[in-house]
């Protein structure tokens, strides 16, 4: 896994501490990711989320790469972070890896059930795709 990115994100979210600061940071990052990617189609659209979230997967040299986008600025930032953590890894490593997004109760408490549900759906899809690449 991209442990440097993971550690950096953990440090950032631990430093921000307040819900307001975390939201401001996510909005800042989400606004910086302002483009219209080529993979915005119904094949890459996740179902079960309140917001629209697209994930695109491809592999190179046995590693999986993930691109993401959302129409929600906050979810766009969160999916960006998740894809940075999980991208460029072997499928088995993706399946076995547990991100701090769900291990940290304080972090989870900052988000509504709907946002936590969206993150679970994203992680489930990432692991599902990793399993497909193993087969």
Image (cartoon, rainbow, N blue to C red):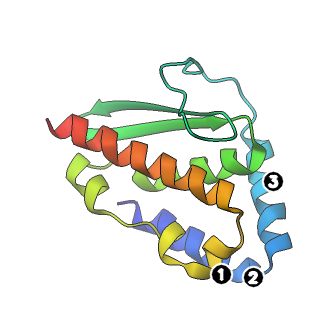
CB atoms at circles 2 and 3 under 8 Å apart? no
The answer to whether residue 88 is seen in the rendering is no
> Is any atom of residue 95 visible in this view?
yes
Query: Dot 2: what SS?
Result: loop
The CA distance from mark 2 to mark 3 is 16 Å
Helix, strand or loop at mark 1: helix
Real-space Cα separation, disc 1 to disc 2, in angstroms: 6 Å
Residue under the point 75% across and 41% down: 72
For the residue carrying disc 2, how many other residues have a C-alpha within 10 Å: few (<14), some (14-19), or many (20+)? few
Pick the front one: 110 or 65 = 110
From the top left corner, tell me how far across and down residue 12 is, in percent.
66, 73
How far apart are the alpha carbons under marks 1 and 3? 17 Å
1 and 3 marks in contact (CB < 8 Å) = no
The residue beneath circle 1 is 14
Whether pointer 1 and pointer 2 mark residues with C-beta atoms closer than 8 Å, the reply is yes
36 versus 95 height, above or below: above
User: Residue 27 got which mark?
Assistant: 3
> Residue 65's spot in the image, x, y percent?
39, 38
Numbered disc 3: secondary structure: helix
User: Residue lying furthest left in this view?
Assistant: 135
Tell me the quarter of the image containing the N terminus: bottom left
How crowded is the residue under tag 1: few (<14 C-alpha within 10 Å), some, or many (20+)? some
Q: Residue at x 67, y 75 (%)?
A: 109
Q: Residue at x 65, y 81 (%)?
A: 14
The residue located at (80%, 74%) in the rendering is 19
Disc assigned to residue 77:
none
How far across and down, in percent of the image, does residue 39 sit?
54, 21
Tell me which numbered mark, 2 or 3, is placed earlier along the sequence.
Answer: 2
User: In front: 4, or 133?
Assistant: 133
Q: Does label 1 or label 3 sit earlier along the sequence? A: 1
The C terminus lies in which quarter of the figure? top left
> Which percent across, then down, holds residue 103?
47, 76
């Amino acid at each position: 896994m991209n442990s440097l990115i993971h550690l950096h994100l953990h440090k950032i979210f631990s430093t921000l501490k307040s819900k307001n600061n975390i939201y401001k940071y996510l909005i800042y990052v989400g606004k910086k990711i302002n483009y219209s990617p080529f993979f915005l189609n119904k094949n890459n659209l996740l179902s079960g989320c309140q917001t629209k979230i697209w994930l695109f997967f491809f592999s190179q040299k046995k590693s999986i790469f993930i691109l993401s986008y959302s129409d929600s600025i906050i979810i766009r930032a969160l999916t960006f972070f998740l894809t940075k953590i999980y991208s460029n890894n072997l499928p088995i490593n993706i399946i076995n890896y547990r991100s701090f997004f769900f291990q940290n109760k304080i972090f989870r408490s900052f988000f509504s059930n709907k946002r936590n549900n969206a993150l679970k759906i994203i992680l489930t899809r990432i692991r599902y795709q990793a399993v497909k690449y193993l087969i």
